[in-house]
């Protein structure tokens, strides 16, 4: 397990060992941001009737074509009312946007083209009236039984409208995992604690929780353990018992107090890989618990931790949620970059557009992988393949945005 693997191999191993989460039915009010796991079908035609698209009058086109221009108003219908049918083809119905078109009518003349006096609507001179004009035909958007939204997509605002239109009070979505974020290290303190000169405040787990919440994962718990084997052993045993995903930060390198891999394996977590040919984040550890838990040991340095989380953990969560794979995002490198080591380089960048509308990735300089403050102006990072050592300006690169 000590053999250093490529980022592509790491992707394959994670995907091979972590499956798709079960489904669950949730109330309609709770679906925003969840991944749809069962197709949504139309329970009736959309629109469900011939829908009027302009305020005006509904009439029989043949009457206008025969030369009639003055139409007695038989009544008025607004949206939400049952249609009013004509008793005479020479009449019209005053009608409002969204209303049901009477079956006896076949076109709508907008109010801007009319003069209405004493209950008679007159079509103004020069106005051309067409059959089926200003009508949204029944079933022209979709038919009853048609698939409105296919499973495997995240339910964002336009898609949320679909189950609302079909009356789905319960929707089948992904069962969200319980996620534990674990910071390790004697030097870490909570944000509200006083810190001594030799201590630092914990940042990695808070940044990762923010990314998870932004992606719709809310069942997230934060933990911290010092570099004490017995405390790690006891704490991680309890955490593994109640979580599907465990993300640790720190304690995964080769130092005397890098206890995480040994403790995890003692707890029955099978190590799948340790060390990836990338910078930053080379000491990345991944394993599978006895109950199928996905367990990640991220490096403790903040840049390494955040890059590794976004590069590996978030894609696994999306795959396990049943989200259909999307093509990777891309950007154009705005300036040349050199990196001579045979490692994949995960380069923080800020994004901009040039005059041609291209998305540009501008490298953000950092003072090492501990410089989390240097990440503030960045929008994400790009992946530079290990096979190359020089990347000229204009190179198309794979882009990962921060959550």
Image (tube, helix red, strand yellow):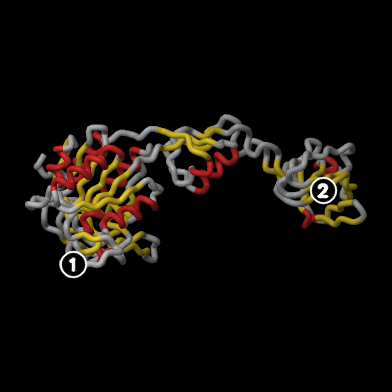
Label 2 vs 1, first from the N-terminus: 2
| Foreground pick, 360 / 284 | 284
Marker disc for residue 174: none
Query: Could you tell me residue 41's position as x and y percent?
Result: 54, 33
Query: Could you tell me residue 254's position as x and y percent?
Result: 8, 50
Marker disc for residue 94: 2
Front tag of 2 and 1: 1
Residue 27 in view: yes
Marker disc for residue 367: 1
Residue at 16% in and 57% down: 186
Residue at 15% in and 49% down: 252
Q: In screen coordinates, is 400 left or right of 90? A: left
Question: In the rendered image, which quarter is residue 318 located in?
Answer: top left
| Foreground pick, 142 / 44 | 44
User: For the residue labelled by badge 1, is the local secondary structure a helix, a strand or a loop?
Assistant: loop
Badge 2: how crowded within 10 Å, few (<14), some, or many (20+)?
A: many
């Amino acid at each position: 397990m000590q053999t250093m693997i490529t980022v592509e191999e790491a992707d394959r191993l994670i995907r091979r060992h972590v499956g798709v989460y079960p489904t669950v039915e949730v109330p309609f009010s709770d679906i925003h941001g969840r991944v749809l796991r069962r197709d949504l079908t139309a329970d009736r035609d959309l629109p469900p009737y011939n829908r009027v698209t302009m305020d005006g009058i509904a009439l029989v086109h043949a009457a206008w074509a025969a030369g009639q221009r003055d139409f007695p108003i038989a009544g008025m219908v607004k949206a939400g009312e049952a249609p009013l049918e004509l008793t005479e083809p020479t009449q019209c119905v005053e009608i409002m946007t969204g209303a049901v078109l009477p079956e006896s009518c076949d076109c709508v003349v907008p109010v801007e083209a009319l003069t209405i006096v004493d209950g008679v609507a007159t079509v103004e001179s020069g106005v051309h009236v067409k059959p089926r004009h200003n009508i949204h035909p029944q079933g022209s958007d979709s038919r009853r039984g048609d698939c409105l939204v296919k499973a495997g997509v995240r339910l964002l605002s336009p898609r949320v409208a679909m189950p609302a239109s079909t009356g789905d009070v319960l929707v089948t979505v992904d069962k969200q995992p319980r996620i534990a974020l674990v910071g390790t290290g004697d030097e870490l303190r909570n944000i509200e604690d006083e810190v001594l000169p030799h201590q630092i405040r914990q940042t990695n787990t808070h940044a990762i929780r923010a990314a998870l919440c932004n992606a719709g994962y809310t069942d997230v718990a934060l933990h911290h353990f010092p570099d004490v084997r017995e405390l790690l052993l006891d704490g991680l045993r309890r955490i593994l018992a109640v979580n599907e995903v465990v993300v640790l930060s720190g304690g995964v390198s080769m130092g005397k107090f890098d206890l995480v891999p040994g403790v995890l394996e003692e707890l029955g977590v099978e190590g799948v890989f340790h060390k990836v040919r990338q910078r930053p984040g080379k000491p990345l550890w991944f394993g599978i618990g006895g109950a199928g838990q996905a367990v990640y040991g991220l490096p403790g340095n903040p840049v390494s931790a955040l890059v590794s989380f976004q590069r590996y953990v978030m894609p696994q969560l999306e795959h396990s949620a049943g989200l259909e794979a999307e093509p990777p995002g891309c950007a154009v490198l705005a300036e040349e970059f050199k990196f001579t080591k045979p490692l994949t380089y995960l380069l923080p960048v800020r994004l901009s557009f040039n005059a041609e509308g291209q998305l540009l990735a501008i490298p953000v300089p950092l003072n090492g992988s501990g410089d989390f403050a240097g990440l503030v102006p960045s929008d994400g990072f790009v992946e530079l393949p290990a096979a190359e050592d020089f990347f000229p300006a204009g190179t198309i690169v794979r882009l990962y945005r921060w959550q």
